[in-house]
Structure formats: structure tokens, C-alpha cells
């Protein structure tokens, strides 16, 4: 569904994309199939190896060790809350964008989820929890403009995850690395530099 939501909003952007925390590279493959030049970075060695086996340019490591670009768009899907230095990392992201390029961020919105309902979607793997206001301030501080936010209902994800939990152990198919657990996605942001 990310593909169907994101691609129409990138009309006029140079078709080159970089994904931070690209996992096994499935989103990058979709972009590549649409004619985009793509690259990514990922911390998990198994995911990096799998993405490379599919012909994708994926570097193991953090943003700083990644291709400098520039890129028409940079994507962070459920990554922002895991960054230890969000300001510094987003500065690195900004410097990899074309002038007028787009930054697409998907993250949970802490202001809309009561702490008691966070459950397994919360700490310790999330270093920070952002509200829409926090994200707008952070991006504004870095010089991003034309910030727009779209909200998505994630209750269906909660139900699916709780339904699937017992069979989670058998989640390895066709040589792909074990699927990353889904993170809660309450707010999505599409911003332009």
C-alpha cells in the first residue's frame, strides 16, 4: 500500500530514490520496476545480503556510510523512532536530496496513542516517540518546507498482528530473511526540501 500512496505524490521528482532502513529491499524493487535509480542502507546483515542478491545497491550500516546522492526522494519507513540522533541523521538525509526533492517519513504519532495502548509497538526498540508537532519542528529546523501529513488508521494492523502472533515463528519464505516485525504507523509525512 505504501507504493500506491507514495508514487503519485512524487510526480515531478527526479526518479532516483534512497531508502534508509530498507530491510530486504522490497520497496526499492518496486521503485526500480517503475524506472527509478535506487539505493538503500540497512543495519541487518541478512537483509543486506538478500537485497544485494536481488541486484540492489544496499550498503550495510547507518546513513553516514551510504551513497551521497543526490536523490530525488529519500524514504524512512518506520525508522525515525529508532534513530539515536534524529537531527544529525535527518541532516545527512537532507544533504542527499536534490533541491526540491522529497523526504517521505512514516512514523507513529505518540500524541495519538495512549501510553497504555502502545504495547509491543513501544520501547525499548524505539529510542524516541514523535508527535506531528515534534516532526514539523525538527524538519523546519533543518530547512524543509511544504510539509504535509496524512493520517492512517492502524487498528487493522494491531488486529492482524495479534491474530498472527502464534504462527510468527514460521515466517521464512523463499530464501528471504525473516520478516521484520511491523511497527505502528499512525502518521505519515511527505515533505519537500
Image: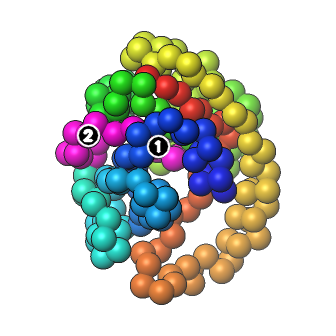
Q: Locate the C terminus and report the quarter of the image it occupies.
A: top left
Q: Is residue 74 above or below residue 53?
A: above
* Res 32 quadrant in image: bottom left
Among all residues in the image, which is located at the extreme bottom? 174
| Badge 1 element | strand
At a point 57% along the width and 22% down the height, the residue shown is: 147
Marks counted in the figure total: 2
Say which residue label 1 marks.
76
The answer to whether any part of residue 28 appears in the image is no
Q: Against 145, is 127 above or below?
A: below
* Magenta-colored span: 62-79
Give the label, 2 or 1, closer to the camera.
Answer: 2
Residue 142 drawn above or below residue 28: above
Question: Which residue is nearer to you in this view: 136 or 165?
Answer: 136
Badge 2 element: loop
Residue under label 2, please give it.
69
Asked whether the viewer can see residue 179, the reply is yes
Amino acid at each position: 500500500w505504501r507504493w500506491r500512496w507514495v508514487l503519485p505524490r512524487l510526480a515531478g521528482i527526479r526518479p532516483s530514490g534512497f531508502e534508509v532502513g530498507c530491510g530486504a529491499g522490497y520497496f526499492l524493487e518496486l521503485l526500480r520496476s517503475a524506472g527509478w535509480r535506487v539505493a538503500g542502507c540497512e543495519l541487518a546483515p541478512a537483509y543486506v545480503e538478500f537485497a544485494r542478491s536481488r541486484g540492489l545497491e544496499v550498503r550495510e550500516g547507518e546513513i553516514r556510510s551510504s551513497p551521497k546522492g543526490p536523490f530525488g526522494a529519500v524514504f524512512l519507513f518506520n525508522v525515525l523512532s529508532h534513530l539515536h540522533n534524529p537531527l544529525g541523521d535527518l541532516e545527512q538525509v537532507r544533504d542527499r536530496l536534490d533541491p526540491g526533492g522529497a523526504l517521505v517519513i512514516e512514523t507513529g504519532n505518540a500524541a495519538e496513542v495512549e501510553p497504555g495502548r502502545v504495547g509491543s509497538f513501544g520501547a525499548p526498540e524505539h529510542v524516541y516517540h514523535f508527535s506531528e508537532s515534534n516532526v514539523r519542528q525538527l524538519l523546519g529546523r533543518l530547512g524543509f518546507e511544504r510539509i504535509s501529513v496524512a493520517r492512517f488508521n492502524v487498528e487493522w494492523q494491531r488486529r492482524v498482528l495479534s491474530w498472527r502472533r502464534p504462527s510468527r515463528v514460521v515466517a521464512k519464505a523463499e530464501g528471504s530473511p525473516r520478516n521484520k516485525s511491523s511497527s505502528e504507523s499512525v502518521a505519515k509525512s511527505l515533505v519537500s526540501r
